[in-house]
Image: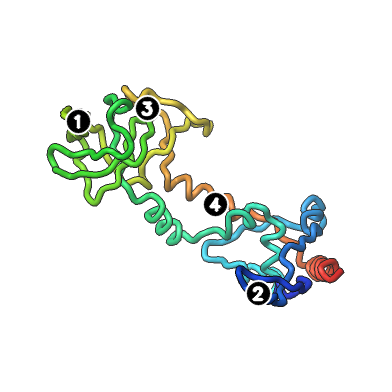
Amino acid sequence: MSNYFKFFPKIRYRFGDEVTSNISNNLSVYIDLLDTIKDEISFYLPYEILDGDRPDIVSQKLYGTPDYHWTLYLLNDDLREQGWPMTEQEIEAKAESVYPNRVLITEDEIAEYFLPGRTVTGEDTGNTGTILKRNLDLGQLFVESSGTYDDTERVSVTVGDEVYTVTLKSEIVEYNAVHHYENSAGEYVDIDPYNQSTTGLIPITYKNRLISINEGLKSINVIKPSSIETVVSEYKRLLRE
């Protein structure tokens, strides 16, 4: 965005513990021109970002130059706040990075003894892991572990001299675990964690949610090519005032 920031007025600013000040762009300046025209439908049109598109590529497609890529962010709050949509490969990588743990699902009682910070051990696999958090509404234990558990094995925690055990219904990598269930109308639906009947319900996984949020970023508004020069020129003029 160097072509964008160069239009900001200059000020003297002292960075960190530096004794002397340096000349820098005044990034606190904000012009609400593009916020104003968001409601003026005559200035913009809808655009769908394609997989692999970059801001400079979209600018080139629309305006014949990559230099107006910054207008895409200023015209779309979601892009400004959440960033540019990821590619399918980037989504996969982010899902694996953000949700790397194992999720153990059970219909047994876990509220009292299977607490975060405790070690859970599989009776068959011998695998151990640390409980990071729980979702009691779905009977889920989120476990940091280097190995996997068998789907229906018994797992236990030790509290003092006592061992407490539950039987797993299943286990899965975190990004493919269910975040919540929805009905056909897309509404959240609660289930009984002790009798997890989900017939007719749609499981929404953690990766599904990442994909959905990412897809929502692809539908944007862009300044019409016929108006771009007028809007950019006025924006630059206001910055110089």
Residue named by callout 4: 215
Taking the image as shown, residue 25 lies to the left or right of residue 79, namely right
Q: Residue at x 52, y 31 (%)?
A: 187
Front-most of residues 225 and 111: 111
* Residue 134 x, y percent position in the rendering: 36, 35
Q: Quadrant of residue 237?
A: bottom right
Q: Earlier in the sequence, mark 3 or mark 1?
A: 1
| Label 1 environment density (alpha carbons within 10 Å; few <14, some 14–19, many ≥20) | few
Q: Residue at x 78, y 58 (%)?
A: 34
Q: Is residue 24 visible?
A: yes
Residue named by callout 3: 199
Front-most of residues 155 and 63: 155
Task: Report the quarter where the N terminus lies.
Answer: bottom right
Distance from label 4 to label 3 (Cα)?
Answer: 27 Å
Q: Residue at x 58, y 67 (%)?
A: 54
Residue named by callout 1: 160
In the structure shown, which secondary structural element does the residue marked by tag 1 occupy? loop
Q: Earlier in the sequence, mark 4 or mark 1?
A: 1
Instruction: Say which of marks 3 and 1 sits in front.
Output: 1
Q: Residue at x 34, y 51 (%)?
A: 100
What amino acid does circle 2 point to?
A: Val
Residue named by callout 2: 19
* Residue 25 x, y percent position in the rendering: 72, 72
Find out whether the residues at labels 4 and 3 contact each other: C-beta distance under 8 Å: no
Distance from label 4 to label 1 (Cα)?
Answer: 49 Å
Instruction: Say which of marks 4 and 2 sits in front.
Output: 2
Find out whether the residues at labels 2 and 1 contact each other: C-beta distance under 8 Å: no
Instruction: Say which of marks 3 and 2 sits in front.
Output: 2
| Label 3 environment density (alpha carbons within 10 Å; few <14, some 14–19, many ≥20) | few
Find out whether the residues at labels 3 and 1 contact each other: C-beta distance under 8 Å: no
What amino acid does circle 3 point to?
A: Thr
